[in-house]
Amino acid sequence: MNYLQEIAYLIGSVGFIIGLKMMGTADSARKGNLVAAFGMAVAVLATLFLDKTGFHVIGNLGYILAAIALGTIIGTLMAKRVQMTAMPEMVSLFNGMGGLAAALISIIEWTHLQHTGEIAGSRSLCSNYRRIDYWYSFVYWKYGRLGEIEWEIGRFSFPCATIHQCFSIGAHFCCGLFCIQWR
Amino acid sequence: MNTLIQFVGENITYFYLIILMVFVGIELISHVPSVLHTPLMSGANAIHGVVIIGAIIVLGHADPADYFSISIGFVGVFVGTLNVIGGFVVTDRMLEMFKKKPKK
């Protein structure tokens, strides 16, 4: 066993946490963003070039690098060109892209498990949730004003963003528990 | 009740992880000035794009002859990269605006 990949993931996670913490203060916020990006780069490189057996280049490397290059170019262009006022919708769209990626992963995993004959209870549940998350983000992006609507229930008024957060946290938590149970 | 206790006991590491993560999360986002909320949300979204790791693993282990998995995985890695790169660049652009303020 070679734990280089696990250690790289650990470094990446610590980078995320330190980066987020630094983003909480105006002076170090920009550096914090870079620290988080560094953590992500470490994690991606560890996935591409490390393995449980040590240094091992992952299969289909050509396809993966092509997809990453395409995503980098288009993502940078989209992010650079968007108007400052349209930022929240843009962030929401990017968030939805992450959800879509997870949904696509689950489709492959599901077909893979169908071939091997295992029951994919927890995974299909997760995938369904991720699809909901994706469409929710899509709707949020499409009708960006949604965040400004406040729902008044009795004496309490909830901004929609809070409802989205509660939905998200709850669903993530439930999926986590299901995944642990049926792993 | 017994099964619940057994479930918690068998997965106690995960429960520690979840609970400690809740505290880390609360600690990270509390006492943040409200002008920084939007970039913080955007940065957290970029980190959320870590799902790209999963997409890379799935595409990397797909059979090269299985074009269905390859094409779906390709799109998965592509949109995952959009999430990560776009998220970090957008956050950087937002934070660019804050840098000039202390000079006033």
Image: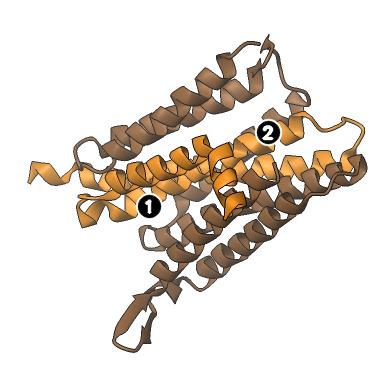
Q: Quadrant of the C terminus of chain A?
A: top right
Say if B98 sits above or below A19 in the image. below
Give the spatial CA distance, label 2 vs label 1: 25 Å
Q: Residue furthest left?
A: B104
Name the residue located 61 percent from the left edge and 34 percent from the top edge: B53
Q: Residues within 10 Å of mark 2 (few under 14, many from 20)?
A: many
Q: Position of residue B84 (x, y in %)?
A: 52, 41
Name the residue located 51 percent from the left edge and 68 percent from the top edge: A140
Q: Is residue A72 left or right of residue B45?
A: right
In the depicted view, which residue is nearer to us: B1 or A1?
B1
Give the colour in which the image draws chain A: brown
Asked whether the beta carbons under mark 2 and mark 1 sit within 8 Å of each other, the answer is no
Name the residue located 58 percent from the left edge and 65 percent from the top edge: A138
Q: Residue furthest bottom?
A: A154
Q: Which residue is mark 2?
A: B56
- Amino acid type at circle 1 is Met
Q: Which residue is mark 1?
A: B41
Q: Is residue B62 left or right of residue B79?
A: right
Q: Position of residue A133 (x, y in %)?
A: 59, 61
Q: Quadrant of the N terminus of chain A?
A: top right
Q: Earlier in the sequence, mark 2 or mark 1?
A: 1
Q: Identify the secondary structure beneath mark 1.
A: helix
Chain of residue at mark 1: B
Say if A118 sits above or below B57 in the image. below
Q: Position of residue A43 (x, y in %)?
A: 54, 27
- Amino acid type at circle 2 is Ile
Q: Which chain is orange?
A: B
Same chain for the residues at labels 2 and 1, yes or no?
yes
Image coloring type: by chain
Q: Is residue A46 left or right of residue B60?
A: left
Q: Position of residue B7 (x, y in %)?
A: 59, 45
Name the residue located 57 percent from the left edge and 28 percent from the top edge: A44
